[in-house]
Image (tube, coloured by chain):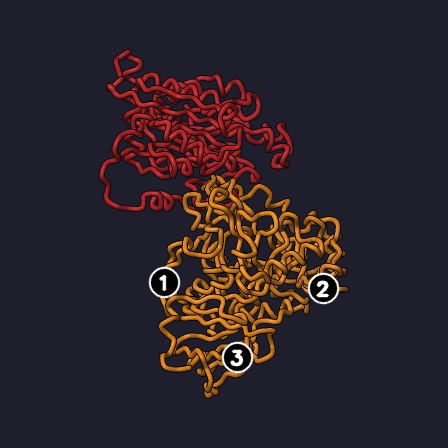
Amino acid sequence: MSRHLLGIRHLDREDIEELLGLSKDFKKKVLEGRPIANGKAPVVGLLFFEGSTRTRVSFEQAATYLGYRVSNFASGASSMSKGETLKDTILTLRYERLEALVMRHRSSGSASFAARYFGGPVLNAGDGQHEHPTQALGDALTILERKGSLEGLTVAIVGDVAHSRVARSNAWLLSKMGADVRFVGPRTLIPGNVSMLPGTVYYDLAAGVDGADVVICLRLQRERMEDGQLSSVNEYRRLYQINRHTLRYANPGCLVMHPGPLNRGVEVDDMAADGDASAISQQIENGIFVRMAALYWAFQDPPAKPAKASAKAAVQTGKARRKKS
Amino acid sequence: MKTVLKNGRILDPSQDIDLIGSLVIEHDQVVEYGKKVDERGAVEVYDCTNLWITPGLVDPHVHLREPGEEHRETIVSGTQSAAAGGFTTICCMPNTNPALDTPSLIDFIMDKAASPEAGGVFVAPVGALTVGNDGTRLTDLAALKKAGIVAASDEEHPIQDSAVMTRAMETCLQFDIPIMAHCDDTSLSAGASMNEGAYSAMLGLKGMPRSAEEIMVMRNCLLSLHTGCQLHIMRVSTWGAVEMIRQAKYLGAPVTCEICPHHFSLTEEAIGEFNPLFKTTPPLRTSLDVDMLIEGLRDGTIDCIASDHSPYANYEVQVPFEEAPFGMVGLESVVGVTLTNLTHKGVLSPLETIRKLSSAPAQILRLEAGSLKPGETPVAQVCVIDPEVTWQFDVTKTFSKGKNSPFQGMPLKGKVVLTICGNEIYRDARFDARRLAGVG
């Protein structure tokens, strides 16, 4: 038995606590130079169909610390470029006896698709605009370290929420752990109906950041301008950039986070990205430890739980709240 | 040979008949029906107690995929599937490869459909409205009409340019060809894979806004009103679209519309964890839409039911949701799903159910079908339905090559047990026991 990590939406609070607990243990061991390998050395396939440096390196580092072996597939070199279907690629990797699969793919839902055909655990390293669970776990570990707890915090997720898998995973995780989540951004980049997502919508940055303990900036993709979803970079900068002026509305000591890669001077300025309040470098480092936890966790048997539709239950925690501002 | 279907509930919406009686077929024709019929000389007599005897069903919207996409369906397999679904007349869509945009392709369809290995149903082709469905150059509509098309459509590539659509309507009015329109403003729906709303936001999928459908429904209704061209709107899915069609009818526009069983039976929630079997266009909407669509069926705004039978090969569907094609098979589940979700729930009476499945689409497209009246159709077109039998839909046992059904495994109440189109073209094993011994 094993388990998949397809999204935070599918987890309950106990799963998240277990993963964060494991992450802390692994971090301690790595920083103290203590041995981690537990005799098993499964082979983990890294299948990245979308460009990624940090996430792939982070998973490689995590596997190395765990003593797992890694097999890398880049989409350009794989048989997918010869016309093979994703299903056949997944089945091939299954019969190549890979024991776990870490996958990134441009298509929302591709991780659950892979899990349908790959025998062992599948870890979602980003599926389209759906979820990026290990990013959210790394962000949560960082907030925990800096703030001591997630419970009761106010977290503003600022920017292109509609197209962001990081926003979705973070919103699920933080809300399940008792934080108050806000989505802040222009109307064109916030889904029109957030009743199935756990967060309150703010279209005005000052109101959205007001009283926040954490601000998570999202990367602004250039194609949003080409699609006409934003008039200009300047307009966005003026209205939604996180900088020392806009941070004045937040609580003292408000953390500034960003999943990277940064558009410096667009969604976040130098002062905010590099100042004392910034947790960006810590997020990157913690990414390794949560991925260790995820890889380890995926190979463990799930604990016996009372039968319930956990995905359904989780979905229903999303509340319809929308604030005009 | 003389066949008697005895003691059934005869439902003929073309004559508003709903009576318990018997129906006699002789020399491929319905010769009489009523409470008392002449059974002398009958070779086959079947006890149809508690069964419905209806006109052969008519499906105005089927994708037979041939020519060009025979890995999905062929005219042979598609017509066999239609026969098993109770249909005796189906309209096939022109978005094949090549598109049905020349008379020779219409001849090809008709020849194939009439071949002995085919399912024995009448196939009424719908011709392409523009060359290659390109949305700009009109086809030779008069020649296509002469070759046998019953309507014209650009199907999944709806004409975006209103000037082109106006010219298409003027031309079709001149040659008396109804236009069947899939209504979608593609500038709003491009790249989207499900209904825009709470679920698309949660799943991170680009959504098709309801306005993409409604804008085109409204535009096409207005053009129909102003040109006078007969317009049949395909597969309505939103409450707004139904409301606009209601208004267009009120204004006197020659507009009709159809609905697919999945749109009145399922909502976007059914997609669950990205199940591509539930991906269709227009997409599955919300429970509010389903309620209002059912109201539209009840009050007659929605004229008929169409399967939008859209078969695909398994490998085309077994892909991530966003990459999956739109559409689902339907011919063999229409009756079960419709009876389960409409008739048995009291939305439609048995007669109205059969009207929306036979005489209404036949009248809209002026087909020689959808009636039990002797001499009304070229040969007897009859369907026998067991409305009370409960069964589990199993797509692996269907005649269609496509197995992409959202109703797989679903318990249904109501099933076709016999289809006659001149000859008997489908019989369910359940019907065998109905044969009365000692007669003939």
* Percent position of residue B274, x then y: 44, 43
Say which amino acid is labelled 3: Glu
Above or below residue A109? Residue A81 is: above
- CA separation in Å, label 1 and label 3: 32 Å
- The residue that mark 1 highlights is B391
- What's the residue at 51%, 73% (across, down)? B382
Of the chain colours in the picture, the one used for chain B is orange
- What's the residue at 44%, 26% (across, down)? A47
Relative horizontal placement of residue A144, taking residue A305 as reference (left or right) = right
Q: Nearer the viewer, mark 3 or mark 2?
A: 3
Specify the chain shown as red.
Answer: A
Above or below residue A54? Residue B342 is: below
Instruction: Assign a secondary structure to mark 1.
Output: strand
Total numbered labels placed on residues in the image: 3
In the image, which disc is placed on residue B325? none
Marks 2 and 1: CB-CB under 8 Å?
no
- The residue that mark 2 highlights is B229
Marks 1 and 3: CB-CB under 8 Å?
no
